[in-house]
Image: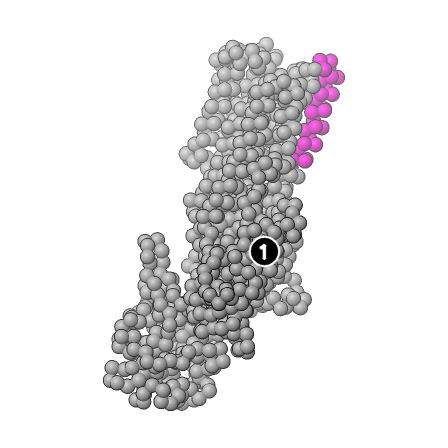
Amino acid sequence: MGGELLGPAAEQAEGLSEPEAARRLTAHGPNTVVIEQTTPVWRRVLRQLRDPLILVLLAAAVLTLATADFPDAAVILLVIVVNTTVGVVQEVRAEQAVAALSAMSAPTARVVREGRERSVPAAEVVPGDVVLLAEGDIVPADADVLAAVRLMVDESALTGESVPVEKAAGDDPGAGHALSAGTVVVRGRGRARVTGTGVHSALGRIAGLLGGAPGLTPLQRRLARFGRTLAAVIVLLSAVVLALGLARGQPVELMVVAAISLAVAAVPESLPAVITLSLALGARRMADRRGIVRRLPAVETLGSVSVLATDKTGTLTEGRMAAERLWTPAGEATVTGTGYQPAGEVLRGGRPVTAERAPDLSALLTAAMLCNDAGLQPPREADTAWQALGDPTEAALLVAGGRLGLVKAALESELPRVDEVPFDSTRKRMTTVHRAPDGGLYVACKGAPEAVLGGGVLDGAPEARARAAAEAERWAREGFRVLAVATARRTEGPGSGTWETGLELQGLIGIVDPPREASAATIAACRRAGIAPVLITGDHPLTAGAVARRLGITAPEERIVTGQQIREGTAGGLTGVRVFARTSPEQKLDIVQAWRTAGHVVAMTGDGVNDGPALRRADIGVAMGRRGTEVARQAADLVLADDDLGTVVSAVEEGRRVYANVRRFLLYGLAGGTAEILVMLLGPFLGMPLPLLPAQILWINLLTHGLPGVALGAEPVDPGVMRHPPRPSEESVLGAGLVPRILVMGTLVAAVTLVIGVWARHTDRPWQSLVFLVLGATQLGVALGSRARPGTTANPFLLVAVAGALALQVAGVLLPPLRHLLGTEALTVPELLLACALSGVGHVAMRMQTRFHPERPPTGPVPAQ
């Protein structure tokens, strides 16, 4: 339902050829990868009507119309219309909400044409154009760098690599020179020649992997099997009732109508309404928690998830760099806090320290803040956060210094910069020179440990360098990006001598993309619910492993598989691994498909363009709304507007609630249908030639399967639902012992009804009217006994619906117009009280069954935790 697709493969799925798809893409601009909202309403409606159970209802509506039973036909058609309308409206609303989050594409680009610089819409950039790029720009198309000045690009949306990548001209052997569409310039400036746009760009190639419409959800597959089975059983039993009636000499027309009425009564026509209501309530609850459901069935699918495959950068982590560890020859310290705001502390020995109390840390971070070109921007509005300006790694150093109590503006005022040696990929370090208050010079250098600790940069004892090198190696194995910092005091003026010699080591800074606060709790909650977390990222194996161990996804001894191993065929079974690193979009698809082939329901979370194909292929795709790219949002079924991964756990709970309510309704509805069939089959053998008239069957069915049945879809979640594993995707919706419970309850209701009928017939009472009233009232008692939280005011709609249905059932034997319509007779007050009292039998029996034969916990294929 409702998944607009991306790129030419998607257009082919809608019946277009690839050339035509390309033309439609180019019409929006050659470098624009768009998701066209072209699905007509009639096609959306047809998608809703293809549901197998809806097809059964349509057949039932035709049968009721054929027998001139217009009221029941109207009810069935109303259920179909409401179900279809809700599904289409939810689909459209979700697309509008996702469109409101769109912030991916570059609206304009600066190009050089005919020797003149001009600003053009990004959609008009073509191969051969020379584009000008500056800090903060979004690269509008694939391009080769012609010239660059300290150009660094954030490619995390495409590669999953959290650290920005330096770019240089093509003849520079030490740096990459290719730019990809959709990446962001975080530092410097450059000129690049466009090489690929639209479907021929990196975005377009990934978009091509997004083709194909979403498949059926686990619930839809279960209901399809259920619908086929139910249809066959109904036809068989109706034929038996027809044959028995004709054998007893009943009129052919009456028995045909009775058989059709019984078939209609046996169809739980409220089931689509129950499912739609449950899904709509779940979608509304998700919206309250900042989760936008793009496809209504996705709510239930989350309840069946057994594997949560997640991206790292921006999903499990904050998608930013943070300096978390500090080391000096005098000792270690840690930095606390989240985001780029200065709030946080520097801890040593578990206690906060300041610049005055920790001069070694002050010296380390002072140098790191001065040898720095980044900035921090305070929130502009109440609901925004601090932002990094420039290189995120350098911004992380500013944050760490701020948490120690240092202020960059004050440091630069005291030590103004007078010279610098910019960073380059060959030297792997940056050096700045500052005028000290005493007239001397202060030199600050930072860079990769091997570039600072070696190469004749430092003076001092080799033992200190060896200690620092060992510490840097240990941090690197733990997934940190390590910077070494050194300083010197000089008396000679700018330009006299080499600045990067004879420096004194101040220490090391460990930088990492920190996990989100909610990530560890989310992973733990998933494990408790029997859901196996799997990390799939394009980042470095050491970084991926460190994050996975930190969040409890994997144990230290477990192996990490890389994309190269998958490509070479040496990775082994993909379902035995919990961490995948350096993966391409195609390999993410392979991993997700491997889990699905093994019989698991897979949820994939991500935010980057490279996550889009896997989000589409997974049973449920979950995208980040704020940080997420447009490609990821459009490929997903659920969009987290606040990027809070904890919302996924809430969504899983909602999905399990939906499935539990579907089974709750099936137990109630099919038990009633079973009781009606048994009454019609066994009644003649007990002296009741035709226990119920066709109109009476349809009336009972209308009242019991109507509002009370739909109200069961609004039942709250069962306590402890998240302490059980998910149900196997191939388990029948009637599995886990539901069929015996249906038969037991149906037999009990039928027995009570038949006993009353026999007693009434032998005492010369209006037995058919009593059978009619008792059968309906007892079923309503079962509905009350089906509540998830009995004895509470939870779901008052069910209480009102049952009370209203019981009143209408009684009215069927009291009000003359209804008696005439239904063929019933008036009952005395004692007979009415007896019939209504027997409704308590259904309630008590249901509660006892729930207590002594509770729902069997799932025992399906759950991945090893």
Residue 364: x %, y % from top left: 35, 78
Residue that sits furthest to the front in the current view: 114
Relative height, residue 478 to residue 12 (above, below): below
Relative height, residue 46 to residue 425 (above, below): above
Q: Left or right: where does residue 356 sit relative to residue 160?
A: left
Question: Quick one: quadrant of the C terminus?
Answer: bottom right
Name the residue at 62% across, 60% down: 586
- Residue 673 visible in rendering: yes
Mark 1 highlights which residue? 207
Who is closer to the viewer here, 431 or 593?
431
The range drawn in magenta is: 226-252
Residue that sits furthest to the right in the current view: 247
- Residue 531 visible in rendering: no
Q: Amino acid at mark 1?
A: Ala
Residue 207 lies in quadrant: bottom right
Residue 466: x %, y % from top left: 45, 85
Question: Quick one: quadrant of the N terminus?
Answer: top right
